[in-house]
Image: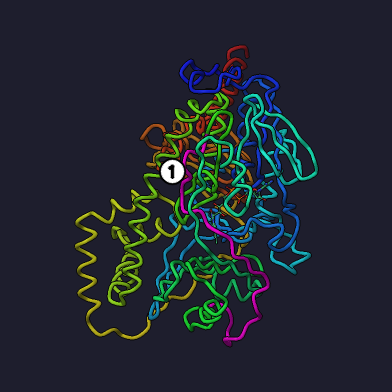
Amino acid sequence: MPAKSNSTSQTQGNNSGSFSLDDGSRIAVIGGGPAGSFFSYFILQVASRSGMHLVVDIYERRDFATFGPTGCNMCGGVVNESLVQALSVEGIDLPPEVVQRGIDSFFFHSEKESVALYAPFHQMRIATVYRGAGPRGANGLKWRSFDGYLLELATKSGANLIGERVTDLVMNEGRPRVETKDGLSQPYDLVVGAIGVNTPSLELFEKLGTGYERPATRKTCNLEFKLGSSFITGRLGNSMHAFLLDLPKLDFAAIIPKGDYVTMCLIGDKITNDFVDSFVRNPVVSTYLSDSGEHDAAACRCAPLASLGNAVRPFGDRVVLLGDCGMARLNKDGIGSAYRVAKVAAITALFRGVSAGDFGKGYWPVCRTIVADNRYGRLIFKVVDVIKKSRLLTRAVMRMAREEQRKAGRQRWMSMVLWDMFTGSSPYREVFMRCLHPAFWGRLLGHIGASMLPSRGPVSEPVRGQEDNMDTSSLGRDYRTGDVIVREGEIGDCMYVILSGQAEVMRSTDGEDVRLAVLGKGDIVGEMSIFQKERRSATVRALTDMRIMTVDRKIFLKRVHEDPSFVFPILQKMSQRIRDLNAELAQLKSG
Ligand SMILES: Cc1cc2nc3c(=O)[nH]c(=O)nc-3n(C[C@H](O)[C@H](O)[C@H](O)COP(=O)(O)OP(=O)(O)OC[C@H]3O[C@@H](n4cnc5c(N)ncnc54)[C@H](O)[C@@H]3O)c2cc1C
């Protein structure tokens, strides 16, 4: 059972009774975006494992089945590779109707050239999604909203959805009371703020007197262009396209391919209509919007604020703020940081308590690592800005990355820096440290020298064709019947989650292949080499056509370090295998 709050946290609280959650405790989650849904899902899952019943009410003003900005939490819609892998271990497999397109590569375009970087294992481990039902006017699309899908995971776990806007939040005898536009007024043991930064409701939390101050924000702009699936597949492929153009006012620009549409994401302080028009007409950009330079106007457009990182004191007695309004990664992977902080807040609330002291000890340490990492991020973005402004440096960076991609077996210094930086796959600190390595500098200086020589003219790279059997909305990698996924005796540094299909586990004994098990959807393969650095103990072969997600050891271990409960689904599978083995052993002995 969850522990009682300790005495220190009690004295830091407001003495209005116990700060621990018990059977029947009531939690209000305000905001049903990723942060609110992840929090609700994980607290209900973990509580149910502990035999505890909680009442979780999610207040969400949007209907995610509505097309256009009204039903959408307005973002680029890229679910990054660390999050896709982490979710597959958690048993959350993004379904094809939610994934607009699986992404396996990143193109960088400067004024004169482009370079392509491909994901490790050539797998679709980045997903593009719509946060709402889809762009304005896109009625009839078969896709489902990502936020709607997460919200459904939470409600299927037992959360109640209250489709209303929260208009007031007051402390009544030490307990929060939530009031809605339609006059609902309810008391709770804990209130969770997951309202993002695009809402006036932030002041409800600021006036509570816990010391909370909203994070700084900046302006952005998203546009959706309908280009048709075949143009997108041929011209953009399964690749994100980032533009390193020296345009005033622009910090980041990318085109993200989806089903029939692309999302153009622009970040900068003064993105006006005129700026957008000139950006879209830029020859480097317009190639990715049409063959002729002519294309329809954007079908949908929004100008949301982006969080610049961390709020001040995102917790108090019986109050915690998550996601963009509490703690987010700078410029990247906002959905991934919402998942991280939501899960740690849920575990803190359950196993420590809900006082300011409890959140300070359980929740804040993870937030602090994000705050510290964002400092490295700020530094790196300043360097990127300098590089974008210098043609020589941009050319040298592109040259170095391109050469690394062409020469197999080379240490990929620049490619890894660019990949991790733009996909948000690694902490900014790791990217920064990699840039300090003398070998990185040695190579870069060489390429700066070479870039001073007259160039051979524009260098561009074609997008790579898609494998025939690969559905554009599939994540992971396809295996055909008979393909070997893992070979006995090989050294492994990853494990596999089966997304669909069946595989057999074989081991050779005295020259004969013995079938040890048949595995199916949701099963995990090759996890032993993550825990023990040993050779694979068995061969795993596809019994049917299969789809599999590879999970890197590094990503897995990083998650376990931050959130030890991450290993729980694997322990569950391993304990089931031990049970099965015991049953077989008992049968052998008795027979
Ligand atoms: C231009 C842009 C592009 C981005 N691209 C990406 C990307 O590609 N990948 C990525 O990972 N991140 C991206 N982000 C960041 C990402 O959008 C956020 O980090 C993420 O949405 C945070 O989730 P959240 O749940 O904290 O907040 P939100 O997604 O903003 O959700 C908050 C929810 O609270 C609800 N709400 C607010 N007030 C109330 C109220 N009073 N009552 C009831 N409900 C309320 C809202 O309706 C909303 O559903 C981008 C951001 C911007 C601005």
- In the image, taking residue 195 as reference, residue 440 lies left or right, namely left
| Residue at 59 percent of width and 46 percent of height | 203
Asked whether the viewer can see residue 511, the reply is: no
| Residue nearest the observer in this picture, 423 or 104 | 423
Asked whether the viewer can see residue 167, the reply is: yes
Q: Is mark 1 within 8 Å of ligand 1?
A: no
* Residue 28 on image: x %, y %: 67, 34
Residue range highlighted in magenta: 288-315
Mark 1 burial class by Cα count in 10 Å: few <14, some 14-19, many 20+: some
| Total residue callouts | 1
- Amino acid type shown at disc 1: Ile
The residue at the far bottom in this view is: 292
Q: Does 506 lie within the magenta span?
A: no
Q: Does 313 lie within the magenta span?
A: yes
* Residue 466 on image: x %, y %: 55, 67
User: In terms of image quadrants, where is residue 247?
Assistant: bottom left
- In the image, taking residue 194 as reference, residue 153 lies left or right, namely right
* Residue 526 on image: x %, y %: 48, 38
Q: Is residue 539 above or below residue 173?
A: below
| Residue nearest the observer in this picture, 275 or 210 | 210
Q: Is residue 337 above or below residue 54?
A: below
Give the SS element for disc 1. helix
Indicate the quadrant containing the N terminus: top left, top right, bottom left or bottom right: top right
**Residue highlighted by disc 1:** 555
What secondary structure is the stretch in magenta mostly built from?
A: loop
